Structures are given as structure tokens and as C-alpha cells.
Image (cartoon, helix red, strand yellow):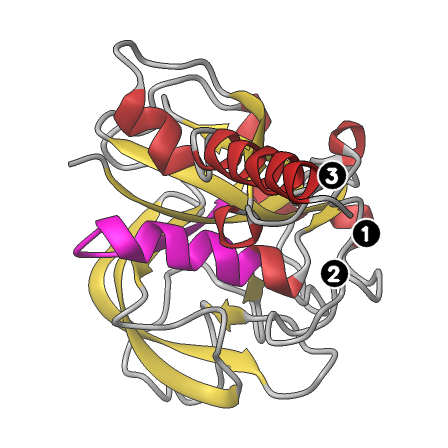
Amino acid sequence: MSVSSTFTYTSFIVLLARRCRQRPNSCLELAKTSNTTLPNQYYEIYDVDKCNQINPTSWHVYCDFNSQPGYVWTAIVSFSFSNWRHPNIHARLTYDYPANNSNPESYWSLYRMSRDQMVYTYNRYRMVSSRLLWRAICNFSWRPRPFPLKPRDFMQSSFSSLDILQFSGHQVCHEIDYVNIRGYTAIKKYFPFYADGAFTPIHFKSYASGSPCGYTIPGSISGEENFGDYHNPNRKFSCTTHADSATSWWIGSKIH
């Protein structure tokens, strides 16, 4: 290869890398660089850690800019009640079990990012956010925007309180910023969380025998699981009311 052709090839790679880094790398960056509030929809983002490759990695994610003004969220898991036993949904988040992560059309009923995509999303938010958050929601796509101040069947807290991407354990008490189950709200209360096997997805129980964490949501049925692993579903909890009721988990933060 001649010196000139080597230079041309190197210049081409540098140009590709520069263009790659100018492309959106997360929902958070999209929100921070836009002069207007963007619509909730699927967006293509790029893995800027791999911009030196000829074909940089990109994928589609669902971004929520409107449900909670001043916040931005990226969906990492979503599944219908009819799919809660699906092996890719039923695996703990510490494992790599993607489902339709390149097929947005299947999003609400059966979707899960790859483990690498989840960690990448977490890292992009963490780089620019002082308090990284997560949330779990029933029936996101059916809800009006913005959400009310106390949304129903909704849970939100910080990664400093509970790291959902790393958590494994059985009946471990964690303080959660906000929980609403069937209209009952709990703020800064402790709940027992579970993800004690490779195929036990993260979830908590609004009722556990003996109230090990000191608090039980009124009206809970015995062993009631919330936001996953629905062996004992309460039909009054909107994630488990109908076969197409949806549960989704998200990573997000305030837009600073």
C-alpha cells in the first residue's frame, strides 16, 4: 500500500470516527442538545466507545421525554403479563438475555436490552448525572402525559439505594423513594426485593409473610409480587390485570 493510499485510508477512519461521535449516544444526550422537547419514540443511538471502527455499533431505544417534565428515561425491559414467564424476561438483569432489542415493533409485549446495552446506557447517564435513577411502571403506553404527581402502580428510586443491574438476593430490604401499588402510596419505605436465581427477575413483594422490612401495602394478597415474577398476581394491580397489561423498567435522570 502506498503512502498516499495509507494516508487516505487513515483520514477516512478519522472522519468516520468524528461523525460517529457527533451522533446521539443516549436519550439523555438527545434531551440535552435539543432546543425543544422531543417526542417520545424510538431513536437510533451510537456506541461512542466504538467509534474508531469502520461500522460503529448503533441500535434503537425508546426514549421518554414527556411523562415526567425535567426528566429523561430510557426503557431497558418491557413485557406483557402473558409473557412474564418468557425465559428472556424471567432472567435476572445481571445476565445477558436480550429479546427483540433490534425490533422496536415488539417493544411493549416482549423487549429486553442486551446486558452490554444496559451497562452502556447506565454509563452514559452516570457520566453526566449526579443522581442516576430507575423506575418500574405498569402500562406506560396507555398513560396520559405528563404523569400525575403521584402516579399509580409505579415505583421509582436511585441506583445508590438499589442497583437494579447488579442486584441478586432473597428478601433483601431496600428503601425506595416512591412506590404506588393499587393507589396506595409509600414514600421512603423499605420493601423486600428478590432476584435470587438466574431465572428470578428483580421484583418486590407488597406483602411478604411477617412483613420482613416493616411495611406492607394495604390490600395486598399473600405473596403478591409486583413489577415481575408474577407467581401470585393481584388482578387489581394493573400490571397483572389483563394478558396484554405491560410492565416496563427504565433508567433515567433529571436533565441538568
Q: Disc 3 to disc 1, how far (Cα)? A: 11 Å
In the rendered structure, which disc, 1 or 2, sits on the residue that comes first in sequence? Answer: 1
Density class for disc 1 (Cα within 10 Å; few <14, some 14-19, many ≥20) is some
Residue on which the image places disc 1: 83
- Residue 120 at what x, y percent from top left? 50, 57
The mark found on residue 242 in the picture is: 3
The residue under label 2 is which amino acid type? Ile
The residue under label 3 is which amino acid type? His
- Residue 187 at what x, y percent from top left? 20, 58
- Residue 251 at what x, y percent from top left? 42, 50
The C terminus - image quarter: top left
Residue found at x 49% / y 46%: 48
Q: Which residues are magenta?
A: 118-137
In this rendering, the answer to whether 13 lies above or below 37 is below
The residue under label 1 is which amino acid type? Asn
Q: Disc 2 to disc 3, how far (Cα)? A: 18 Å
| The magenta stretch spans residue 6 | no
In the rendered structure, which disc, 3 or 1, sits on the residue that comes first in sequence? Answer: 1
